[in-house]
Image (tube, rainbow, N blue to C red):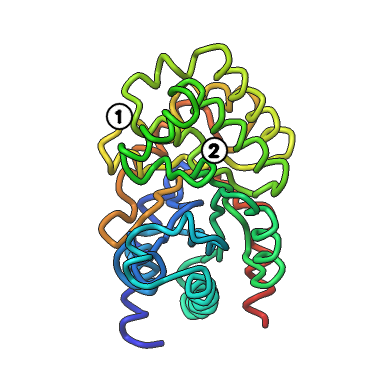
């Protein structure tokens, strides 16, 4: 073992000993976007992995975005870099190869899971199934970032455009949770990413979530998640952007707890600087609410990872 790897191992042992008191291990079920494979993130994927090790994480899911098959949802920075569906597809293949390499290289220091995060656009269901068949990720994070082809979390201006398109913010929420329900049925992802992302630019979301038509959809989706044994991502990126609470918000957390749904922290890191930020407070809060802090891995992910490392 190289000297640097000894240092990483020593760091991990020290931090793990501290964080494992009371069974609270540092994990991230939805993390690890890197500038190498995502232009709105920073740092190389290996730097990301080493930072997780240095911060005492026991296991982490690296969950890069799936490559879109249509031009309409490619982000401006990707278009400016001359990237279209073909280029993004090839980049995703390189991500899988690099993540598998790092999975083996650092297997003594951390359990890495190779994930895929979905997008939402016309025809995405077929694309997800094709990518899963070809690249065989360890698990899938089911996320909604677009309604039709309008990005809801890219900017406030685009969010407002989506609200106008769908007839107001209440109807935007309803459409979001309906699209989420369709995604859950079509893909059955092991993890549901940032469940209530639709509140990102809504200062009145606390009241809006309680409105009958919206709450009925939330409960319907949670019932499906609970029945299928899926994991909810307790996504901390909201805090990095100035929100007062993560996705999922507390009223929805209580509903998830009533249904016995597993909720697992996800730092949704987009670079070394955001790795592990707010993770300890999130773990404490989930413990206070009565969630199991022996964090459950995505179904089948550990077995898939082990098969991949055996070759």
Position of residue 258 measured from the top left corner of the image (x, y, whole percent)? 62, 22
Q: How many marks?
A: 2
Residue at point 39% right, 42% down? Answer: 153
**Under tag 2, what secondary structure?**
strand
Q: Position of residue 95 (x, y in %)?
A: 49, 73
Considering depth in this image, is 216 or 283 the residue closer to the camera?
Answer: 216
| Eye-nearest disc, 2 or 1 | 1
Would you place residue 77 above or below residue 201 in this image? below
Q: In the image, which disc is placed on residue 263?
A: 2
Asked if 20 appears above or below 3 in the picture, the reply is: above
Residue at the location (36% across, 32% down)?
160
For the N terminus, the quadrant is bottom left
Using the rendered image of the protein, determine whether residue 79 is visible from the camera's viewpoint.
yes
Note whether 11 is above or below 152 in the view shown.
Answer: below
Mark 2 or mark 1: name the one nearer the start of the chain: 1
Residue 81, numbered label: none
Q: Residues within 10 Å of mark 1 (few under 14, many from 20)?
A: few
In the image: residue 15, left or right of residue 111? left
Is residue 207 or residue 68 the one in the foreground?
68
- Residue under the point 48% across and 55% down: 72
Q: Which residue is mark 1?
A: 244
Helix, strand or loop at disc 1?
A: loop
Where does the C terminus fall, quadrant-wise? bottom right
């Amino acid at each position: 073992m190289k000297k640097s790897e000894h240092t990483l191992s020593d760091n991990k042992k020290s931090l793990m000993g501290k964080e494992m008191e009371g069974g609270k291990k540092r994990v991230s079920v939805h993390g690890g976007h890197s500038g190498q494979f995502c232009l709105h993130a920073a740092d190389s994927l290996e730097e990301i992995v080493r930072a997780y090790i240095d911060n005492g994480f026991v296991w982490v899911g690296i969950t890069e975005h799936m490559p879109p098959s249509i031009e309409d949802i490619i982000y401006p920075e990707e278009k400016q870099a001359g990237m279209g569906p073909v280029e993004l597809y090839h980049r995703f293949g390189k991500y899988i190869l690099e993540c598998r390499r790092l999975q083996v290289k650092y297997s003594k220091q951390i359990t890495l899971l190779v994930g895929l995060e979905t997008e939402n656009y016309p025809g995405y269901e077929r694309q997800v199934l094709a990518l899963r068949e070809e690249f065989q990720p360890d698990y899938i994070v089911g996320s909604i970032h677009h309604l039709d082809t309008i990005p809801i979390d890219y900017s406030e201006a685009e969010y407002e455009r989506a609200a106008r398109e769908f007839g107001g913010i209440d109807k935007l929420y309803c459409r979001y949770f309906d699209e989420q329900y369709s995604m859950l049925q079509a893909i059955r992802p092991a993890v549901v990413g940032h469940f209530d992302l639709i509140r990102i630019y809504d200062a009145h979301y606390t009241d809006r979530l309680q409105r009958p038509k919206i709450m009925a959809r939330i409960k319907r989706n949670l019932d499906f998640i609970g029945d299928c044994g899926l994991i909810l991502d307790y996504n901390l990126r909201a805090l990095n952007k100035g929100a007062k609470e993560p996705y999922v918000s507390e009223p929805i957390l209580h509903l998830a707890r009533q249904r016995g749904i597993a909720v697992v922290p996800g730092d949704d890191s987009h670079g070394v600087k955001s790795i592990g930020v707010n993770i300890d407070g999130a773990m404490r809060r989930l413990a206070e609410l009565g969630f199991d802090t022996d964090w459950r891995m995505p179904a089948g992910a550990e077995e898939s990872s082990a098969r991949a490392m055996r070759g």
